[in-house]
Amino acid sequence: ELSLIWLRNDLRLADNPALTWACKQAKKTLAVVTLTPQSWESHGESAARMGLWRDQLRSVAEHLQELNIPLRVLRLDSFDDCAPALTDLVRELNTGALAFNYEYPLNERNRDQTVCKALESVGVEVRGFHGELIIPPGQVLTGQGGPFKVYTPFSRAWRRRLADFDRSVLPVPEAQQTTGLDSDPVPDDLDYKPLQYREDLWQVGEEAVSERLNCFIDEREPDYADKRDFPALPATSALSPYLTIGAISPRQCMASLRAAAGSRDWLESSWLNEIIWREFYRHLLVAFPGLSRLEPFRPEVEEKISWLKNDAAFEAWCRGETGFPIVDAAMKQLLETGWMHNRLRMVVASFLTKLLRVDWRLGADFFMRHLIDADFASNLGGWQWSSSVGADAAPYFRIFNPQAQGEKFDAEGRFVARWLPQLESVKPGKSRQIPGAGAALGRPEPVIDYKKARAASLDDYQN
Ligand code: FAD
């Protein structure tokens, strides 16, 4: 008998609980992917992220081939087509079991429930696994048994709960018996759109990704807490694109951290803390389904904000032409590499929502369409946090001053000059962070006056 592993955003062979289970269920295993371009379009999946996904899938398919696990590519339209297509497939192949790793946004969960029902009704055993998280959703609860709404107590409880969950990394499964089935080719555009990303920056393959992780842990993690906020430095792991498509698991990240920690208390590592933020946003998505419908976590805050239809300013923000050096350099980094430093994501999101007063949903959608690490839960969490409508968000009246942020975190102006070449001829230091800097050299004038915009925003909020 044959078992199926339905691959989605879990493109790895090691530490993949669904794959491990599928291989144990039967002597023969087939991997299947479902191409659903209509659903991807409605979720705004970026060409960069899907390009990385395609190439990582190809790499995984080659390795699976070595384990005698062929890949079947089902070319569909939307999530709704998955249940009938998978039902046909299990009938055709006389399959007894199907495994997958859970995904947490609502549409994905609905899709999976429909598939489970359909396959179980034809006698197939279906199993889901929480391979995307270290601790499954619903397992970190308050004393009253409810979900945490604030991060710090969540993270403390998460650390306490950790001992109850398996921390060991699953090995790559053993080779299976041959199936006699051929692998399908993976189409270049995934039937979606032309896919493109900076292949020179983002290599695929499990070896390349593990090397990135190990390099970070050995060389940069010890200084992470001190350096992580400075965008000119390569101080963070840049693993987010790989975590997002599941080319590496958070458990692998934690294991590597732990192995290298020596006598240091790895549980208190600032880097692990960021991985726990990732878990927090996924747990929230499951506990509060309205978030998947883009409802604010704190509607009482959003009610007091009147978003402006500020098309010209929004477009200037999208292009990195607001005249605020740190904002524009960050947006250029996004447009050119598909990635943006975390500090700058907060700066540009605050700028868009609190100074231009553009609805956070437009910013979140733009990020989803451009980030190579676009991730529904973390992106939503980040945007709601930045606009003060999210869980554990700063109060609305805390508005980042972009110039001050630039002076603090890019004091020499190295980062801004890297992305805005006109600023190279401006003296290094604070002058590179002044709104309108380099205007004589072709940089735009500021789209707003910071002080006035701030006052107008606070006025609106308080009235
Ligand atoms: P590191 O600093 O090395 O952190 C390690 C890992 O922890 C990251 O790869 C990521 O998986 C996770 N992580 C780090 N910071 C956060 C955080 N604040 N929230 C949740 N997880 C975190 N992250 C995404 O992966 N995808 C997104 O679409 C995304 N959108 C964001 C939008 C906004 C407005 C904001 C403020 C943050 C967003 N983040 C997003 C979170 C964070 O900015 C990125 O995860 C981080 O910059 C990735 O770089 P890194 O891999 O070098 O992170």
Image (cartoon, rainbow, N blue to C red):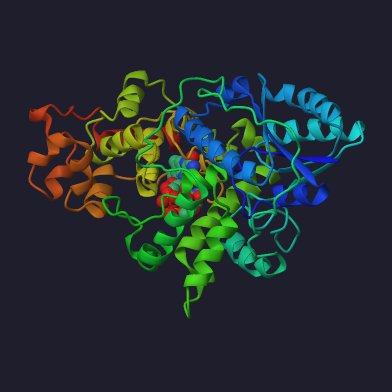
Image coords of residue 244 (percent x, y): 54, 43
Residue found at x 47% / y 43%: 204
Classify the position of the N terminus by image quarter: top right
Classify the position of the C terminus by image quarter: top left
Residue found at x 9% / y 29%: 441
Image coords of residue 353 (percent x, y): 41, 34
Can residue 21 be spotted in the picture?
yes
Quadrant of res 235:
bottom left
Residue found at x 62% / y 45%: 66
Can residue 304 be spotted in the picture?
no
Residue found at x 82% / y 47%: 26
Classify residue 30 as left or right of residue 261. right
Image coords of residue 118 (percent x, y): 85, 29
Quadrant of res 340:
top left
Classify residue 49 as left or right of residue 281. left
**Placement of 61 over or under 236, stated as above or below:** above
Classify residue 277 as left or right of residue 289. left
**Placement of 60 over or under 315, stated as above or below:** below
Q: How many marks?
A: 0
Image coords of residue 255 (percent x, y): 56, 65
Quadrant of res 308:
top left
**Placement of 68 over or under 251, stated as above or below:** above
